[in-house]
Every structure is written in structure tokens, then in C-alpha cells.
Image (spheres, coloured by chain):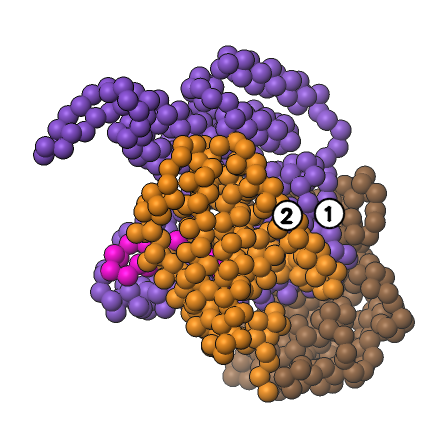
């Protein structure tokens, strides 16, 4: 059961995020280059500047934006929980080990446990940074489809090869995913996966898993051959992606300026 | 003749003789069907004609000139190939970008590329899908997008490998109508492979039957399907309608002057046969 | 588990970007060169990249636990595409993972590319080649590459966190956190990698021959 759930969870998360980014709203209409620039500068600032105010206000702003475009709560939660859990563990760890100024003390079975103020502050800062970074990346990914991101990256002079392979990967994940899941279902029907903890069941599941993986690699190889043939018949000359940006849109530039002002104000406020 | 093949032979490196003796003659503006069961060599033949596999024996001529005299670029301007699985062909993230791939490679200007993309998408009936990511398309839409990608190269001859495979009946009808439209309105010569014999008489002017690497029959649908034994020997069958007519003639002694291949033809023949019967009884 | 955004301080994050960029640049150079020799190379890498991405999100069974975790897929990528190209593939996979499901991060992309795409793939590739030279079978060599390639990723991450983390903690602390879960996972990664290579060698030996991984049998 666990396996099935994991499978569904992963599938949902990557397909859902992709689907949300396809919707039409004020943020998806924005030029991807501006969104990338905006998010990267905020992300950089969060990492570089100390203090709590900037990350907290970024969290507030991005969450408002993400909720405004009706991102399902489940998606937000799915992305929020793992990093937040990690941050919380870190916070507790810091609270109990770092610093001199005791906030509280209690006893568990004669062991004295105390929380310290300095540790708490460090932990809290890290927690805020993690949440803020997560929030800003989430904002980018629910408003910008991968192919828009790829085009923007190319405009920012990220080597073409990287963008080309990124876009091919994005395109064929969906194809290979469907094929892989079909193979997996066929395997499951013939009892290829055992749920449980017997060593024999594990061995069988393992064998099914690597067989499925190998089959997907083989299919990827064959499909590369076909795809390459199809490309060459349409005059493939070694170039797969191209820069399709035209002149800047005036509304986009205006929104960029306002974004810039916002970032500056945020940074100023946090100093 | 837009395409001629003479004594084409091809053997794979593992020793399988995929094509043993292939003769093809396709004149401009035709709608030709290459009919053959699975494994008869249809895909291999198409790969030879489009230049995807090189060292074959025999001769292929495009518009009267031997294949070897053409540069790669000249060939893919003249001959377009639509793969059976549209996922093989559609590699770009969005429909528009994929259709633009060919024209960009032809070195066309940006505005000309955009024009061709728009034009091709219009012709295949998906003008609203230009910015749609390919993984959100239905299978039928993917087929259309793949056809648009080839159409944007403005080929004289369009070759399609099993364009109806994997589609539901409505999807098959739509794709076939699209191909007929491209053939009649755009003047594109069509050569498509299929093993769906019921489909053929409705659309094709000419048929080549390929079996075990050889062309065993060719001619109009009427000519080809009257050679019942050869058709059946080639791992195919008659169209259902023709089969029914055959039984009516044999078992119920209904007279038909020729074998009907479509429902319309069969209806006319049956009705006229019944009318003759009526007049006979009235006497 | 890759390093999350927010865990690493600015200058280290930038530094790791720099180090990874050197390897990625070599990788890009190699991909370009090999694409010129054989134009199919780029589409092939794209498809392999998608396949490795698929492998890395597929749950793998862990012995005794009944629950699942994920393989990294890096050693497999290195075996299939070579270590430098694998660096580029890892970078792309990490970017996609960060964007699509918040595994890893954007500011830590450089650090994660180094641990996974440089250390993981070079060690994996090196061990695979060494194993083959010592006469080990394809499966066993790939298995060893898988185990240590995967393990190396987490050891590297621990060092990166200990020295570049937001707060100084010892390497041992991070190893202590990582190892209980990563040790069994590495073993599974090894078995899965070995199994994959063996399966491909059995069913489609031509693929390994064409990629120069195995010699043609006469």
C-alpha cells in the first residue's frame, strides 16, 4: 500500500505542478525572464542577508500570490512539509544545544534538558530562510512551465546544450512515465511486486524494479533512434532550441520595475 | 512519376532480407496505399525511400532523377515522412515550436517560419493548440501535430506510416479526411502504409500490396481486390463488404457484375440485383 | 536527500557553483564534440536524461522495511553517458527536481551537482571501469559502482553541510543523520544498477556495444 501511495504522490506532485503552471493568470502571463530574475534576486538576498524580517515578508508575499492563483492546498502542503520538518528538527537541535541564556529547563528521567535563547534564534532564522526559499521556488514553479523556464535560461546565456537537454528531458519524462507505469502495472498483475517484508518478496520486488528500469532505458535508447531519424528528415543540423524572444513587452517591463522596487523595499526594510 | 522504385533490395546487418524485390510507381497527385501485413517491410521501404537507411540495392527516382543526385536538403524539401508514433516525432515542448523546427532548419526568416506554423496548424485543424505542451494533447491531436510538422516543410510527397494506428473509429475518419483534403486541395501526393483493408477503397487511387519484402500486386482497388487469392495469400483479406458480396454471389446467387468495395457500391448493386429479381417474379 | 535551499551560506553556495561549473563546462564541451561526430548524441542524452529521471523518482523496495525510497540513478547515468556528460545530466535532473517537487534547491544546485554529478558520477564511472579491467562481470562492476557512487554522494553532502552549512556542525553529525537511511539505500542502488546493466546486456547487447560500454562478442 505504501508503495502505491508513494507512486501516486510523486506522479501527482510533478504532474500537478506542471498543470498549475499551464493555467492562465496574472503571473503566468508575465515574461518568464522577469520572473526568473525576480525570484533569483530574492533567493540570493535571503541567503546573503541576516535577520528574520526579509524571509518572513517573502513568505507572506509569495503565499498570498500562490493562494491567489488558487494553487491547491495539497500541493502547497506537499512541498512545504519536508523542508519544514527538516528545519524544525534543526530548530529543536539548536535550541537544546547552542548558547548560554537558558529559556527553560526540565527533567526527563533525571537528565536535565534546557533550551537556549541563542540556539532558538539561530534555529528560527534557518527555519525562516528555508521556508522563504521554498516559497519563492514554489512561486516560480507554479507560475512558469519548464519550457518557459528553459527559454528564459537560454536568454540568460545558460549554455544551449543544457537547455536543449533540459527540454528533451521534460518532453520525454511524460512519455517514459506512461510507458514505465504500463510496464509496472503489467508486472503487478503477474505478482511482480510484494508488499510486505519477507526477504523473498523483497527480492522479487527488486528484480521487478530493475527490470522495469532497464526496460525504460532500452525504450529510451530506441526512441532516441526514432526521434533522431524524424529530426533528420526535418533537416536537423545539430541545433534543437532557439531563442524565440522578440521585443520586450511594455506591461512586462512595467511589472519588472514594480517588482524591482518591491525587492528593494524588502531589502531596505530588513536592514 | 514523382516516385519510382526499381528492384529495391535491403538486407539488415543481422541477415534479415527485409526487402527482396520492390517496384513502385507513383505519379503526381495520387493517393496511394501501401498495403501489407505486419512485418512485410513497409517501414523499411519507407526508410529507404526517405533516405534514412542508405546502402540499398536497386534504384529509387524522385521526379525522374536518381535519389543519389539529390542533396539531403533537397530530399526533405520534396519528401516528408510522418512516423507511426507521434511521440517519436514531436520532440519540442510545445506544438508550435515543434512545427517550427523544420522551417527553421530550412533557413527561413522568422516571419516566414511563423506564417508556415500558423498555416500548417490551420490546415490540420488545430490552430488553437500552438502554445500547448505536447503531453497535454490527445493521441489524435498528436497525430495532427506530427502531420503539421511535416506539412510545414511543404513537401510534394507525404509518406505516412500507419497514420490510423491506435485511433478510434472517429479518429480514423478524421485523419483520413484530413489526408484526402491535403491530397485534393494542396495537391500533395500521399503514400500511406496500412493493413486496414476496409479503409483503402474509400480513399485510395492506387494500391501496392507488399508481402515478405515483395510487391505482389498493384493497381486500382478494383483490380487489386479482384485477385482474391493473392490478397489472401499475402496475409490480408478482402474488405468486409466485398467479402459479403462474394458470399451473396456464391451462396445466394445474387448477380453482381463486379465486386463492390464500399458500402455505397454494395448498396447500389444489391438494390439493382433485387429489382431485377422483382421483375423476374412479376413475369 | 539533497541539500535544501536555505541550509547553505551564500559564499559556499557560490563557491560550489564555481567548482561544478568547471566540470559542467567540460561536460558541455564533450557533448558538443560528440554531437558533431554523431548527431544522434544529443537526442540520445535527452532520452537517457529522461530515463534516469524516471529511475530516480521510481520507488525502490528496501529490505525488511517494506517501505520504499528512491534511487539516485547517478552511477547509471555515468555508466551510460560517461562521467562528464553525466555531470550535465545530473545538473539538469537536480534543476527539474527542485522546480517540480522541491527536492534540493536552486541556490544549492552547485553544491548538489558537485556531490551527485561530479563525485557520484566520477567515482561510479571509475569503479565500473576499474572493475571491468579487473575482469569483473558487467553486473558486478555496475553493482560496485552503484553502491559506492551513491554512498559518495552522501559523504560529500555531509562534508558540504559541515563546512558550508549555515551553522557549524561536525561532519560526523551529518554522517550520523544520513548513514542509517543511506547505507541500505546505497546497497539497493548497487543491486538495481547491476541488475539493470545485466538485463540490458542480456536482452539488448547491441546497446552496450554501441555506447562503448561492452565489447562486441564474436
Q: Which residues are magenta?
A: C61-76
Which numbered marker is on residue B194? none
Query: Who is closer to the viewer here, B279 or A261?
Result: A261
Residue C141 visible in the current orientation: yes
Q: Quick check: is C48 in the magenta stretch?
A: no
Q: Which residue is mark 1?
A: B100
Q: Is residue B16 above or below residue A14?
A: below
How far across and how far down the image is residue C111, in percent?
A: 51, 43
- Is residue C169 placed above or below A102 in the rendered structure? below
Could you tell whether C151 is left or right of A116 in the image?
Answer: right
Q: Name the residue located 46 percent from the left edge and 64 percent from the top edge.
A: C145
- Image location of residue A51, percent across then percent down: 44, 19
Q: Which residue is mark 2?
A: C22
Q: Residues within 10 Å of mark 2 (few under 14, many from 20)?
A: few
- Measure the C-alpha gap from mark 1 to mark 2: 34 Å
Chain C image colour: orange
Q: Which color was chain B given? A: brown
**Under tag 1, what secondary structure?**
helix
Say which residue appears at 85% left-offset and 61% top-offset.
Answer: B74
Amino acid at each position: 500500500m505504501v508503495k502505491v501511495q508513494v507512486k501516486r504522490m510523486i506522479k501527482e506532485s510533478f504532474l500537478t505542478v506542471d498543470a498549475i503552471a499551464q493555467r492562465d493568470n496574472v503571473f503566468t502571463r508575465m515574461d518568464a525572464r522577469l520572473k526568473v530574475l525576480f525570484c533569483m534576486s530574492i533567493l540570493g538576498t535571503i541567503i546573503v542577508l541576516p535577520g528574520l524580517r526579509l524571509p518572513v515578508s517573502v513568505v507572506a508575499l509569495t503565499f498570498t500570490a500562490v493562494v491567489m492563483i488558487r494553487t491547491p492546498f495539497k500541493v502547497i502542503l506537499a512541498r512545504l512539509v519536508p523542508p519544514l520538518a527538516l528545519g524544525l528538527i534543526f530548530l529543536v537541535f539548536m535550541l537544546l544545544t547552542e548558547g548560554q541564556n537558558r529559556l527553560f529547563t526540565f527533567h526527563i528521567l533525571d537528565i536535565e534538558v534546557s533550551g537556549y535563547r541563542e540556539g532558538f534564534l539561530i534555529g528560527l532564522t534557518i527555519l525562516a530562510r528555508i521556508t522563504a526559499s521554498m516559497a519563492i521556488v514554489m512561486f516560480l514553479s507554479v507560475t512558469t512551465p519548464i519550457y518557459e523556464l528553459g527559454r528564459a535560461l537560454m536568454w540568460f546565456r545558460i549554455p544551449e546544450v543544457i537547455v536543449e537537454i533540459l527540454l528533451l528531458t521534460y518532453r520525454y519524462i511524460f512519455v517514459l512515465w506512461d510507458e514505465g507505469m504500463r510496464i509496472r502495472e503489467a508486472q503487478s498483475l503477474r505478482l511482480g511486486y510484494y508488499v510486505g517484508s519477507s526477504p523473498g518478496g523483497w527480492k522479487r520486488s527488486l528484480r521487478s524494479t530493475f527490470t522495469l528500469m532497464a526496460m525504460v532505458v532500452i525504450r529510451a535508447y530506441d526512441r532516441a533512434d526514432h526521434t533522431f531519424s524524424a529530426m533528420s528528415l526535418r533537416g536537423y543540423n545539430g541545433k534543437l532550441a532557439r531563442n524565440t524572444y522578440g521585443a520586450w513587452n511594455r506591461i512586462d517591463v512595467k511589472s519588472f520595475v514594480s517588482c524591482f522596487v518591491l525587492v528593494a523595499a524588502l531589502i531596505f526594510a530588513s536592514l | 512519376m514523382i516516385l519510382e522504385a526499381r528492384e529495391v533490395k535491403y538486407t539488415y546487418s543481422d541477415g534479415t532480407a527485409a526487402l527482396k524485390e520492390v517496384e513502385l510507381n507513383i505519379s503526381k497527385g495520387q493517393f496511394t496505399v501501401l498495403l501489407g501485413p505486419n512485418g512485410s517491410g513497409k517501414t523499411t521501404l519507407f526508410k529507404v525511400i526517405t533516405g534514412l537507411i542508405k546502402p540499398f540495392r536497386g534504384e529509387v527516382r524522385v521526379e525522374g532523377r536518381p535519389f543519389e543526385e539529390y542533396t539531403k536538403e533537397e530530399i526533405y524539401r520534396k519528401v516528408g515522412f510522418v512516423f507511426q508514433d507521434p511521440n517519436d516525432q514531436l520532440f519540442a515542448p510545445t506544438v508550435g515550436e515543434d512545427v517550427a523546427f523544420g522551417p527553421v532548419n530550412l533557413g527561413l526568416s522568422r516571419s516566414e517560419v511563423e506564417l508556415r506554423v500558423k498555416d500548417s496548424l490551420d490546415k490540420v485543424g488545430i490552430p488553437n493548440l500552438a502554445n500547448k505542451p505536447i503531453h497535454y494533447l490527445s493521441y489524435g491531436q498528436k497525430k495532427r501535430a506530427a502531420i503539421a510538422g511535416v506539412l510545414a516543410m511543404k513537401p510534394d510527397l507525404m509518406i505516412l506510416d500507419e497514420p490510423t494506428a491506435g485511433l478510434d473509429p472517429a479518429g480514423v475518419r478524421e485523419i483520413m479526411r484530413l489526408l484526402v483534403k491535403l491530397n485534393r486541395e494542396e495537391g500533395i501526393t500521399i503514400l500511406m502504409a496500412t493493413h486496414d483493408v476496409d479503409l483503402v477503397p474509400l480513399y485510395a487511387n492506387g494500391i501496392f500490396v507488399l508481402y515478405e519484402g515483395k510487391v505482389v500486386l498493384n493497381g486500382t482497388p478494383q483490380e487489386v481486390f479482384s485477385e482474391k487469392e493473392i490478397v489472401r495469400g499475402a496475409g490480408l483479406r478482402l474488405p468486409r463488404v466485398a467479402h459479403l458480396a462474394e458470399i451473396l454471389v456464391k451462396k445466394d446467387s445474387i448477380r453482381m457484375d463486379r465486386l463492390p468495395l464500399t458500402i455505397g457500391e454494395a448498396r447500389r448493386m444489391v438494390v439493382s440485383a433485387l429489382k431485377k429479381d422483382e421483375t423476374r417474379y412479376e413475369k | 536527500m539533497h541539500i535544501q535551499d536555505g541550509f547553505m551560506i551564500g559564499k559556499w553556495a557560490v563557491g560550489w557553483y564555481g567548482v561544478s561549473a568547471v566540470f559542467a563546462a567540460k561536460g558541455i564541451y564533450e557533448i558538443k564534440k560528440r554531437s558533431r561526430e554523431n548527431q544522434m548524441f544529443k537526442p540520445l542524452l535527452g532520452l537517457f536524461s529522461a530515463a534516469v529521471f524516471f529511475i530516480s523518482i521510481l520507488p525502490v523496495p528496501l529490505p525488511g522495511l517494506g517501505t520504499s525510497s528512491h534511487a539516485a540513478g547517478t552511477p547509471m547515468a555515468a555508466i551510460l553517458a560517461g562521467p562528464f556528460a553525466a555531470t550535465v545530466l545530473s545538473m539538469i535532473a537536480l534543476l527539474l527536481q527542485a522546480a517540480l517537487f522541491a527536492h534540493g534547491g536552486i541556490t544549492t544546485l552547485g553544491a548538489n551537482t558537485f556531490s551527485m554529478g561530479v563525485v557520484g558520477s566520477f567515482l561510479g564511472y571509475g569503479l565500473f571501469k576499474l572493475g571491468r579491467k579487473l575482469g569483473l562481470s558487467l553486473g558486478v562492476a555496475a553493482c560496485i559502482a552503484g553502491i559506492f557512487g551513491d554512498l559518495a554522494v552522501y559523504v560529500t553532502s555531509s562534508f558540504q553541510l559541515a563546512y558550508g552549512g549555515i551553522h557549524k556542525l561536525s561532519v560526523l553529525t551529518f554522517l550520523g543523520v544520513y548513514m542509517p537511511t543511506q547505507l541500505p539505500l546505497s546497497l539497493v542502488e548497487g543491486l538495481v544498477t547491476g541488475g539493470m546493466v545485466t538485463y540490458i546486456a542480456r536482452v539488448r547487447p547491441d546497446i552496450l556495444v554501441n555506447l562503448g560500454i561492452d565489447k562486441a562478442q564474436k
